[in-house]
Image (cartoon, helix red, strand yellow):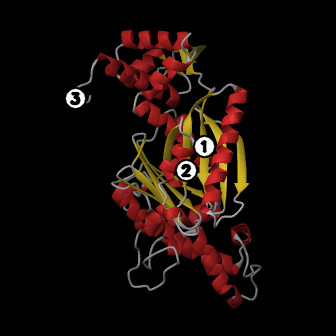
Amino acid sequence: MKLGSNIIDIQKKNRSIVLQTLMEHPEISRVELARITQLNKATITNIIHEFLHAGIVKEIGQIEASNGRKVAGLSLCMEGVVTVVVYIHTSYMLTAVCNMHGKIENDTWTAYRDDHDMVGVLEQYQEEGQKQLEYCRAKNYKVLGVSVATLGWLFHENGRYYIKAGMMAEGFEELDIKNAFSEMFPDMEIWVDHDANMSALAEWYELGKEGKRMPESLLSIVGGIGFGGGIVIRGEVFGGSNGIAGEVGHMGINCMTQRSRKNSRIGGIWEDYASPAAIRETVWEAYQDYPGTVLKENSGLPEIYDAYEMGDELAERVLNHAVKYLAYGLTSLIFILNPEVIVLGDEIIRSSKFEKRLYQYMRDFLPDELYRTLNIQFSRFGKNGILIGAGLAMVKHYLRTYKMIDFIADTYRE
């Protein structure tokens, strides 16, 4: 507990812990709540009584406890508490409404009218955000704020947030993106984070709901333009000193090469060899040397992945090369982070053939003690994972700062 905490702080902290636990366990008993939160039964009884009276928790009848007995169950019911979520990409944006249970509504894809005009792009963010707020008003939803997921590095210092990414409108890298959204939506709480961190939160939450236990640590790797990564430790995103922890694509694996893609300052980084962008570029460079290939100079990832499954010689050579480097980089990250779960997502291929070869290489690279506990999963989310994670990030911000308790008191008071 922080120094100077008073009884009000303690009460808010206890209620935030209970809400967090209810979020992580769709069905739970009072006894389990007490065990997990380590709060005494009387405290749990009082808090649940308040939450039932407010209508944010409901009793759901008998559920099966961990010992197999039937007990009275509880469930969180805050479907009407939402966050407006925004995903910033180089040539388009995604917006949606995400509730506290991770459900997406009204997801909207919008191309920029002119992706070189920063002022115009910002105007579109405001326009689309206002449309989502109008949707919330029409549905009588209670809005926590606006949560923004960005591509590229999200570098922050002294309370300022900058997107470090190529192909954005001129002047964008000097823009304090969090302050810009605060000016667009002055009455809203604003949260900003990197898209890979948002994805990692969504993966963590989904795996926890499925397994009835949240992973202690998770590494999420999203592949597209390069490799991005998100690290979740005990339910919190680890951002490092300036917010760029998890930028695994820039991990050096070959200092002897001069090759450098335009969005990298150095050659020999992991995403140069194993990312979906590297796979696509290698096919483009080599297709003329394989007269029997079905692939062409302009073949995209879906065509490349289909050709791989069909046994196309070029596609197999490129993917087999990439999977070896993927395994090589993962091995380094396992020794550094030792995550309980690794999730591969976005444009990384979902293929049992690819997965089998990946595990073969991991067996070669890892000692038996680490290979036995290796847990690599492929994401079942598309871009919605980023939006869901953005919603969860706002909720966790409210819980972490105890603002959720004030929000409930103000919103649900009679």
x%, y% of residue 234? 39, 40
Q: Which residue is mark 2?
A: 149
Which quadrant of the view contains residue 321?
A: bottom right
Q: Is residue 376 visible?
A: no
Question: Circle 1: is it few (<14), some (14-19), or many (20+) Cα within 10 Å?
Answer: many
Residue 199 got which mark? none
Q: Which residue is mark 3?
A: 3
Between marks 3 and 2, how big is the CA–CA gap? 33 Å
Q: Give whichever of discs 1 and 3 has the lower sequence position.
A: 3
Answer whether labels 1 and 3 touch (C-beta < 8 Å). Answer: no
Q: Amino acid at mark 2?
A: Ala
Q: Amino acid at mark 3?
A: Leu
* Residue closer to the observer: 110 or 255: 110
- Looking at the image, residue 334 lies above or below residue 401: below
Residue occupying image coordinates x 71% and y 71%: 300
190 left or right of 121 in image: left
* Residue closer to the observer: 236 or 87: 87
What kind of element bears circle 3? loop
Which quadrant: the N terminus? Answer: top left
x%, y% of residue 78? 59, 24
Answer whether labels 3 and 2 touch (C-beta < 8 Å). Answer: no
Q: Which residue is mark 1?
A: 85
Question: Circle 3: is it few (<14), some (14-19), or many (20+) Cα within 10 Å?
Answer: few
Which quadrant: the C terminus? Answer: top right
- Looking at the image, residue 204 lies above or below residue 276: above
What kind of element bears circle 1? strand
Q: Give whichever of discs 1 and 2 has the lower sequence position.
A: 1
Residue occupying image coordinates x 72% and y 82%: 297
Between marks 1 and 3, how big is the CA–CA gap? 34 Å
Which quadrant of the view contains residue 132?
A: top right
* Residue closer to the observer: 62 or 98: 98
